[in-house]
Each structure stands twice: as structure tokens, then as C-alpha cells.
Image (spheres, helix red, strand yellow):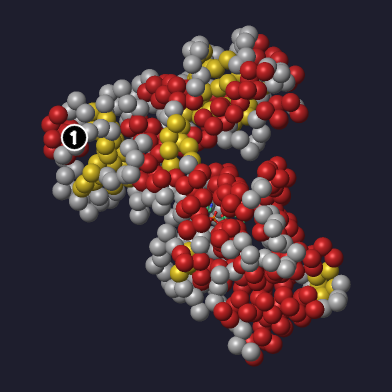
Amino acid sequence: QAQSARLYTEEDPVVILSSDSLKQTVLNSSSAWLLQFYSSWCGHCIQYSPTWKALAGDVKDWAQAIQIGVLDCAHEKNFDICKEFGIHFYPTFRYFKAHDTTNDYGKTYRGADRELQTVRQLMVNFVQNHTKHDWPVGCPPLDPARSEEILSLMGKKTEFYTAVIVEDEDSYIGREVILDLMPYEGLAVKRALSSDKLLMEKLGISSVPSAYLFYPNSTHTVMNVQKRLRFFFSSFLKLLPGVHRKQSASSLQRPQPGNNGQGTQVEWKEFEKSKVYMADLESGLHYLLRVELATHKTLEGEELKTFKDFVTVVAKLFPGHQSVVKLLETLLEWLVSLPLEKIPYDAILDLVNNKMRISGLYLSEQVQWVGCQGSSVALRGYPCSLWTLFHVLTVQAANRPDALANTGFEDDPLAVLQTMRRYIGTFFGCRECGKHFEEMAQESLNQVKTVDDAVLWLWRKHNQVNARLSGSMSEDPMFPKTQWPTPDLCPTCHEEQEGLHVWNEQMVLTFLRQHYGASNISPKYSS
Ligand code: FAD
């Protein structure tokens, strides 16, 4: 068990199968399956596992059509099932059609090329090999649409968008984008071929691949993406207003509004996603100081040290209103001046709420989520503001190298991240989140050597969390969890290498330093 748990874990986007679950999962399933039968002692399987995980992550949204699984034949429990399935070599790749009840053992893929892009295209071909009788439930057609069908959309009002990817016959982009958008509602994606000259002419398309978009209000135009790559097309479509992830059965059972202390919120506030809002940062600080920490009667020992360090980092780096920064500085002076080993939290609250207000130092008590507002009060809000706060702080530490002078944190590239780690582990109300964050910190925080590394580390880890939570209950359907920044925010951050999306980290760093920099923080809606 320990062996197989090490090669693939529940954290990976693959479905881990065993003798108990194999047949009932892949036979007569509503989707097709591609399985890797591996052996945890096989060196090649070990080396190949990162590719398999990357592939599974890349096609996570295709699950209604085809899913990726693994089964460890070196596990004692699986000896018999691997024998029954005739697995002689590792890894063996088998695919299983949707709705197949014949109890067969799948078809083996014997190709020597196991590169991610090749296997992904194999998956597309395999899905397309179904007939209309066994077509995977929920999977849209993958064959090219006829020109009449597309041209009939011109000038027609509809309830949803239609995107048409126009491409050469051997291109996979169209089918990949169709599959990428499968879990989303509010749009239909089709593909058409560049050999359809009439269509090309009518749509005014001269080079492929291109995408054409029909809006619900009957207007239509060529889709303007910065790079004509699968990721850019898919990302553009997922972000159209009115397009969102379909609610799964589990996400319908969301926690009741109002049960996580996010206050009440009714009015929608217009905001730009290219900006950071001071109102979110201040609301987050308010919630943290007056609600989250206030559940602790007294602070002592490690807790008190964590709180002091947190106040130090925020007081020195928070690019906020004068009155808020002064309040934090006064709080810090007070904490440092007290020789006490134990502080009742009421005393801190009294200072923040009453004493400082007399001198005009004031942190709003109103919760105003703007960039962090959710489509319901139970979604987004505080955890969103906490991420935002820490991204701002890592960027401030990088942009203002002297800000932490004489605090004990000078020249420490890890000052913000270690403080965040301890705050999250000690006080953050979401215990599971704290546990996950601690695991990530233990794994790689020691690789951070500079303040720029710290900015990028937090960005990378936040994206790791986004990937894990995508499609989960804590996802707001209006704000799907994506790998961020999306191409519309930072086109130069994205590149493609051998068919797989890759980040240009230098560009990401430049973008983060601008996005979370003081001059990009909007005062709109803040007190
Ligand atoms: P958030 O993920 O909160 O992001 C807020 C904003 O930050 C986004 O709107 C975007 O503008 C920006 N952003 C997004 N990604 C990045 C990035 N990679 N780099 C920089 N900026 C980015 N919830 C769980 O269910 N399980 C967990 O284990 C979990 N762990 C968490 C750990 C921490 C430390 C924190 C602070 C929160 C955690 N949460 C967890 C909560 C979860 O991550 C979200 O904060 C919450 O679901 C609200 O999501 P959101 O849509 O507002 O976006």
C-alpha cells in the first residue's frame, strides 16, 4: 500500500483503482476510460508517473467523456485482477469504451510514443470512435459542423454563445476545446474545417486555427485571442460573462449562506479583475483581527509570538491608508512594549476598537468584499482576502527591500511566507487548509532564496490549491478556479511547449509585481 500510495495519491487528478473497484468503475460506465496498469517497483513506471499526472490534470475537464485511472499490479490485493486482465508488462495502457457491458478487458495501446500530447490525441480519437449508440453521456459532437448549421446562427438571438473553432482537418485544437468546455454551461463549442471555403469566406477567416464567436444577442465576430493555442481559446471561453461551470450534485449542497461569518451582502459591486481592492484587504484585516483572532481568549507562548510577527510584517508592509497603517504600527508598539507573556485578547480588541479611534486611527468594521465578493455570502470573501493580502505582502517585500529594517526580519526573504505559514497553521479557521498549506511549505519552502522567489512560490502554491479545488464545493460557479493569471490578464505569461501549456515565470513575476503592487490597489468602495 505504501508503495502505490507514493506513486499516485488521492491528491493527484487520477482515479486510483483496485481489484474491488476496477470492473464496477470501467465496465458499463457513462464515460470511456484510459487506464495505466503499472507496478510500483518498475523504474519506468516511476519515471513516467509525472507525465501521467500532468496528462490527467490537463484533461481533468474531459471526465464526462473519458477518464484517466491507474492500478498498481505490484499491490498484493491486485495480483489476481492483473492476472485476469492479462497484464504481463508494465506499464500497460488499456482503454475501455463507454457503456461497454461485454466484460472484456479493454484494448491495449501499444504505441511507443507515450508523450503527453500523443496520448491526449489518442484519447480524442478514442472518444470519437464511439457510435451514436454508445456515445459518452454529456459529450458534445466532435465531428465538424456543416456550414449551413453555423451560418444559420448569423443574426439569430439565442440563450447561449456558440464558439466555432475553424481549423485544418488534422488539427486537434477544436476537439480539445470542445472537451475542455464540457463542464461549462452558457455556451456551445463546435468545430469547422478550413476546407469549407464558403464558410471561411462568410466568416471572413483567412488563417487557421481561428475561432468565431456568436453572442446570445445575435452579434458575431472573430474571437480575439493573443495566441492561437488551445489554452488561450479555452480560457477565453470559460471567462465569458454568463459562462460558468455546471453545478455538480455535490456543489448544490453548499453550506448555508451566512455560516462562515462573512456578513451579509446584497448589492453587487462592479469591479475590474485587473485591480486589487483596498476594501478587500481592509475587510480581511477587520475579519482577522475582530472575528478570527477574537475566538482566542488569551494569546501566549507561540501564539503570541505568531501574532506579534504577523502584526510586524503587516504594519511595515501594508500599503494602506495612513490611518490603518498607523493603527497597525500603534498596535505593534503596544505589543512590543508589553513585558507580558500572556495577553487577554479583549485588551487587543479594546485597543483596536476604542482607544485608537480616539486618536483617529480606524479600521472599518464593515465587510465590503469587492474583488472577493461571491455569488452567495457563503462563497469567497475572507479566504480570498487572505490570499490577496499575502500576495500583496510578498510583493511589497520584493518592491521595498528596506521596509523590514530593524524588525528582526531584515534580509530574510522568507519573512512574509514564514509569518503566513505560522498564521495559517495557528489561527486560520479552516484547519484542513492549514494542514495542506503546511505540507506544501514543508515540501518546498526551503527552496526560496530571494524575495522574488517568495513571490513566485506563493503564486505557484496558490495555483496548486486552485487546481485541487477546481470543481469542488468551495468553488464559486461565477468565479471558477483557474490557473491564474489567465491569458486575458497576462498573455505573455503563457506559452506552449510540445502541446503542453507552460508558464513563462519571468513574465509571471513581472506581472505579479505590478498586479499586487501598491499602485494597482484601487481605493474604490474602501472607507
Ligand atoms: P481565491 O483562491 O481565494 O483567490 C483570490 C484571488 O486571488 C483570485 O480571485 C485571483 O484574483 C487571485 N489569484 C488566484 N490564483 C492566484 C495565484 N496563483 N497567484 C496569485 N493570485 C491568485 N479551501 C479548501 O477548500 N481547501 C483547502 O485546502 C484550502 N486551502 C487554503 C489555504 C490558504 C492559505 C487559504 C488562504 C485558503 C485556502 N482555501 C482552501 C480557500 C480557497 O483557496 C479559496 O480562498 C476560497 O475557496 C475562495 O476562492 P476564490 O474564488 O475567492 O479565489
Q: Does the residue labelled 1 lie within 8 Å of ligand 1?
A: no
Q: Mark 1 points at which residue?
A: 206
Q: In this view, does 445 lie above or below 61?
A: below
Q: Which residue is drawn at 41% across and 65% down?
A: 271
Q: Is residue 115 left or right of residue 408?
A: left
Visible in this render: residue 331?
Answer: yes
SS for callout 1 = loop
Residue 321 horizontal side relative to residue 191, left or right:
right
Give the amino acid type for the residue marked by disc 1 in the picture.
Answer: Ser
Q: How many marks?
A: 1
| Location of residue 223 with respect to 109 vertically, above or below | below
* Front in this rendered view, residue 118 or 135: 118
Give the x, y percent position of residue 67. 51, 29
- Residue 228 x %, y %: 32, 37
Residue 354 location, quadrant: bottom right
Quadrant holding the N terminus:
top right
Look at 54% across and 17% down and name the residue there: 93
| Any part of residue 287 in sight | no
**Residue 288 lies in quadrant:** bottom right
Residue 86: image location, x then y, percent: 61, 9
How many residues crowd around disc 1 within 10 Å: few (fewer than 14), some, or many (20 or more)? few
Residue at image coords 18%, 48%? 156
Q: In which quarter of the image is ligand 1?
A: bottom right
Determine whether 508 is above or below 147 in the image: below
Residue at position x 42%, y 32% in the image: 137
Residue 241 location in percent, x, y? 35, 54
